[in-house]
Amino acid sequence: MTKSTKNDGKWYLTKVKRACAAFAMLADGDVISVGVSGGKDSSALLYIMRQLQQHLPVSFDVRPVYVDLGIGMNLAPIEAFCGELGYELSVVQTQIREVVFEVRKEKNPCSLCAKMRKGALVTRSKELGCNKMALGHHLDDAVETFFLNLLYTGKLGSFSPNIYLDRMDIHQIRPLVYLRESTIASLVRHRELPVVKNRCEMDGLTKREEIKDLMKTMETLHPDFMDKCLNALQNVDWNGIWASPESE
């Protein structure tokens, strides 16, 4: 059961509202699917989307969607949580785990899994009449993605807070991009939001875990490291980059 107080939201909702305004994420009449995985980030996102419905002067609908990878997750806490917030959970049954680990035997399983999971989420979102889908990525995710691209692909870039996927005809939004992972963890703990243990065999063994350790080291050396990273993501000096924004 989630907890709430009179002052609920003052310590994190302001940043979410600011992000939504800065990147034009929400508008009257939107129907937004929310990717729910059972993890802390997606539970926090769904909880916050409900608060945004109550506090913002725009009217939009929310459709939580769970993509079942076939790894035997316990959906009961997620379904109960959705019901408590006034939503009905839409479940997409897939064989993603079997395809990734048994059929394809991928050396980099997370990449294929992410693509297939996203495809399933988009398909169900469109079936539900959604024009946008919200994901629970936060500031730590954005910075980690930047360094993953830099160190493993030799590219400069992260993900966009709001991007139109033209081939899929849907906007992908990330309302939590101004929040730190520690803030989300505190919210989940404070409000007793449900978290279901990830049963994927790759949990905790990805390259992203290495980057997380690097981020911790950088913050120890430079306490304002993440703030500087946020500023850098929003203030690109194209004169110092050896390619134009239009180049591929």
Image (cartoon, helix red, strand yellow):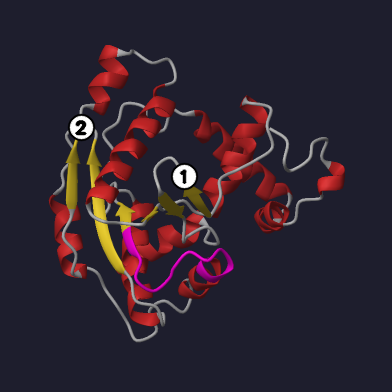
Mark 1 sits on what residue? 166
x, y percent for residue 71: 21, 31
Compared to residue 139, the image places residue 122 above or below, namely above
Tell me the kind of residue under disc 1: Asp
Q: Which residues are magenta?
A: 20-32
Residue in the image at 28% along x and 38% along y: 120
Label 1, label 2: how many angstroms apart (C-alpha)? 24 Å
Task: Specify the label residue 94 is tagged with.
Answer: 2
Question: In the visual, does 52 lie left or right of 84?
Answer: right
Q: Quadrant of the N terminus?
A: bottom left
x, y percent for residue 198: 29, 39
Label 1 crowd (10 A; few <14 / some 14-19 / many >=20): few
x, y percent for residue 165: 46, 45
x, y percent for residue 6: 34, 86
Q: Secondary structure at mark 2?
A: loop
Q: Toward the viewer: 134 or 126?
A: 126
Residue in the image at 66% along x and 29% along y: 151
Residue in the image at 36% along x and 60% along y: 44
Q: Give the foreground label among 1 and 2.
A: 1
Question: In the visual, does 110 lie left or right of 99?
Answer: right
Name the chief secondary structure element in magenta: loop
